[in-house]
Image: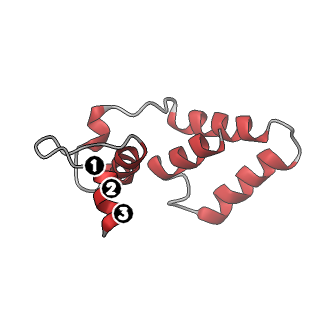
């Protein structure tokens, strides 16, 4: 759940604006609760309404830029392969 929250904070730019204010709000959510992580995720849902990633999120050069590190991470985790020669992207990154 922590990784889920972390990735979504990056995707939706949770700390892109007034970082100190948002960080203080988030720290307040986890300070006095056993279910702090659930509360952090719920706060993300309140701000975004929906945390689903859709194809349109990858359109545009500035708004969608946060999503390209997600693609990179997924190619590494799922051991994506190049279509033609069949090379593993993960192995080619490790070789560099």
Q: Is residue 84 above or below residue 69?
A: above
Query: How packed is label 1: few (under 14 Cα within 10 Å), some, or many (20 or more)?
Result: some
Residue 24 as seen in the image, left or right of residue 10: right
Residue at (85% x, 50% y) in the render: 31
Furthest residue in direction bottom, as rendered: 96
Residue at (68% x, 41% y) in the render: 40
The answer, for residue 48, to whether it is visible in the render is yes
Rendering coords of residue 66 (x, y %): 38, 53
**Residue tagged by mark 1?**
88
Answer yes or no: do the residues labelled 1 and 2 have beta carbons within 8 Å? yes
Mark with earlier residue (1, 3): 1
Query: How packed is label 2: few (under 14 Cα within 10 Å), some, or many (20 or more)?
Result: few
**Residue tagged by mark 3?**
94
Q: Which mark is residue 91?
A: 2
Front-most of 91 and 30?
91
Looking at the rendered image, the quarter that the C terminus falls into is bottom left
Numbered disc 1: secondary structure: loop
Residues at marks 1 and 2, CA–CA distance in whole angstroms: 5 Å
């Amino acid at each position: 759940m922590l990784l889920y929250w972390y990735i979504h904070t990056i995707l939706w730019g949770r700390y892109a604006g007034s970082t100190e204010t948002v960080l203080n709000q988030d720290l307040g959510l986890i300070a006095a609760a056993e279910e702090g992580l659930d509360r952090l995720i719920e706060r993300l849902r309140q701000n975004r309404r929906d945390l689903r990633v859709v194809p349109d999120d990858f359109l545009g050069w500035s708004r969608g830029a946060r999503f390209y590190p997600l693609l990179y991470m997924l190619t590494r985790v799922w051991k994506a392969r190049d279509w033609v020669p069949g090379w593993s992207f993960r192995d080619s990154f490790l070789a560099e």
